[in-house]
Structures are given as C-alpha cells and as structure tokens.
Image (cartoon, rainbow, N blue to C red):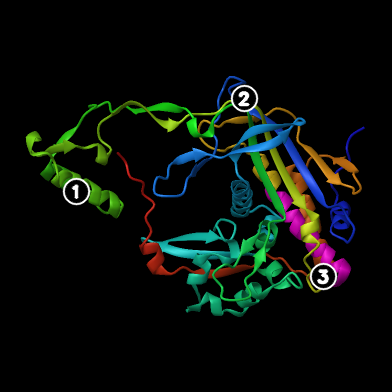
Amino acid sequence: MPSPALTYNLLSEACKAGGPSVLVSTTELAPAGGPMASVAPAKFVTPGANSHATYAYEHRFVDGAAAGVVILDSKQSQLNRAEAALAQAILDGVDPLTRVPHVAVTYRRDGQPETFTDLTLPHRAYDGHVRAGSVAGKPSTDHPAYRAARDATPANARALLDFSPITLAYGGWDATRRSRQGRWRSALVGEIVGVLADQDLDPRSTPLRGGARVDPVAMQVQLGRASMIAIADAQRGELSPRLYDKIVKAAKSADEKSAGSTSASTLGLGGIPPTLEQLAGVACTRILRTHVLSFATLRQIRFGAGPDGDASCRALVAALALDGLVRADSELCLRANCDLVEAGPTRVTIDRRAGAFQELEPLSIVAADELLARAIAAAREDAGVDWTGQIFAVDGDPDIIASTDDASEEG
C-alpha cells in the first residue's frame, strides 16, 4: 500500500498544540565510483598557532553499535545548500517562491550592481552587510521595518515573518546588538555522514594524497627581479595585495648566487612535481543523509493571529523550509572527489507521538511548490499574511566592496 502524501492539512495539524514533534527525511547514499571509491569529506581548520586542515570525526550509534563516522557535509552546509536552491529558484522566476519576502543588499563593483540576499548572506536578516548598508540615504538599522524585524520575539514574530521568513525557517542570531538580540534556532537541521570502513582509523593520521601541476611550457620558470616585478605590476589590479607583496618580496630577496633570478611559481608559472600534501579521501561502508524538521520548535513561536492563524503562519514557515530541502536534495553536488548517488529511495516519517511513526511519500519539487502555494493562501486567509515578493532593498556600503579580496595565493 503506497504511503500517504504530506498534505497541507497534515502540515497544519503538526503546527498546532499536541501535534507531531518532527518530520524526518533519510536517504542512503553511495560513492558514484562504487564501493572501492573514496570520498572527500568536508575540511575544517583546527584552531591555534599550528592550525591545519583536517576532517571532522565523530562517534555515532549505527546499526545497534557505536561506530566511527566522518562528516561529509555539516549542518550549516546543508542549510546553505537549501538556501542557495531557493535563491536560484527565485532568480529563475519560479512561483510561488517569487512571492517570498526577502532582504537584498546591492553593491556596485566597477560600476556593475551585485546583489546578495538574506538567502545567501551568512547571518540572514541580521547580517553585517545589511546592518552596514543604507536605505534612502539613511542607515538601514534606523528603518522602521528593520527595527520591527529585529525586535520580533517568539511571543510575536509577525514582523520577521513579513520581512525575512528564511530567518525563521533556518535560524539567525542578532549577535552584535546591545540588547534584545534575536536568537532563532533553525527549524530544519540536516547533515551527511559516512560510516568509516576502517573503524580503527586514527583521526590524527589521515593519509595524504598526491597532487601535481604540469606546465606544458616549462616545469621550471626562473625570472630576474626586474621581470618578476614588471609582470606583477602589470597584473596588480587583478592580484590580491597580499599576493602582490609576496611576489615582489620574493623577487627582491632572490639569492645573489642565482644572478638575481627566482622561481616564478608565485605567478602561477611552471609546474609542481607530484607531492603528498593534501588530505586523502575516506572509505565508507554507508553514507547517510538525514534531515529533521522540528514542529516542536515552530510551535514555540506566535504571530499575533490567534491559535488557528498562528498555526497557519507556522505551516507557512515549515513549507518554505521543506521547499528548500527538497530542492537541495535534488542536486547531489558537494565538492570535488565527493560524487554521490542515491542508493535507495528517500524515507520520510512523521512522529505520531508515544512511539508511533507514520511513513509519508517523499516530496517532489512540484509537490513542495504546491504545498508552499497552499500555505501562502492559508496564511493570507487565516492570518492576513500578504506575501507578494516584497524586497527590503539595501544599498551596500561602498567602502566594504572596495576593501574585498577574494583572490587566493598561488604557489
């Protein structure tokens, strides 16, 4: 017998007192290259003076026993992927996502506008780019709509729902504010973990893999000081200040025995011989992607619309969170050397309390959009919520964009 679909009525009931605590989505994944293929987990940097890249290893309870796992995609990263999927759908003009209110910060780089939204900025409505910007020539922090959104509390979050609902769905912390800091935990959390094939693996001894760079012109390029500096000067507008200084310093400090010549590797010229210097992949016996949507979290929030109206507002936030989840899950694109495939169907269950669970049919993108459209209509009818794609447009501070540096150092 097929599992029932996740309907709006079920979502609405889950947002009322005494309803289900959570909805859980679980998918078994596998390396695209087969069981013998390793996968590249997410990298993290250790703190301290001797910081270095590493993987995040944890112990979990898998198949009835403790097991070592590695984080392939963290909770923060999974939410970022969901947000990026929603942002792309809005740019593509997908209804009903084009009706979702959001914040947009626009900078001008070389005379061209660049816009970033609360769906892509790390701190969502409370992001520093929003706070540092201006609206109609005045600080954005002085705007009544922004002040109201920042003053929202779980006792009445209506202003934030109308201003930046993604902050309610995926969380936010107004950490820089002196008082009345908004702290919203994400209603949706998720991650991808791999169960280590080698349960005796010492996290301190992760093996390294080889890397190299072949330059078809020459494996070694030695340039004189004047040539190095001249090439750096010609590209100065495209180089990061730190890299430019590194190139010039290398040129000026060339060993006198080499007649003033030095390696042009900092300019990206010449090859790199094969070396073992990068973290190797990890073999996994199982890979699990799990997401939890907490109705219990949403039920702590009120919107000043009475019990039924508040439930409709919560269902609206839940539908938005689910739309992002479904869209992100449809694209298994993590990072290089971590190509995955689905090893089986996604299993969706909803908590029926007292140890009972009901299995539901997984949402498709079409079904998720229809669920969101239904939630928007219900919130309008029950609580007067009017989502018409409102944008809180902020002009980015020009000093910030002038000080940015995205370039990485080569060599």
| Viewer-side label of 3, 2 | 2
Describe the element under mark 1 as helix, strand or loop: helix
The label on residue 383 is: 3
- Which structural element holds mark 2? loop
Which range is magenta? 305-324
Q: Nearer the viewer, mark 3 or mark 1?
A: 1
Q: Amino acid at mark 2?
A: Ala
**Label 1 sits on residue:** 248
Q: What is the count of numbered marks?
A: 3
x and y percentages locating residue 303 in the rendered image: 78, 70
Magenta stretch containing residue 321, yes or no? Answer: yes
Residue sitting nearer the eye, 108 or 322: 322
Where is residue 109? Give x, y as percent: 39, 61
The disc at residue 197 is 2
Per the image, label 3 sits on a secondary structure element best described as helix
The amino acid on which the numbered mark 3 sits, given as a three-letter code, is Ala
**Residue 376 visible in the snapshot:** no
| Residue 5 or residue 45, whichever sits in front | 45
Secondary structure, magenta segment, majority class: helix
State yes or no: discs 3 and 2 in contact (Cβ < 8 Å): no
> Alpha carbon of mark 3 to alpha carbon of mark 1: how far?
63 Å
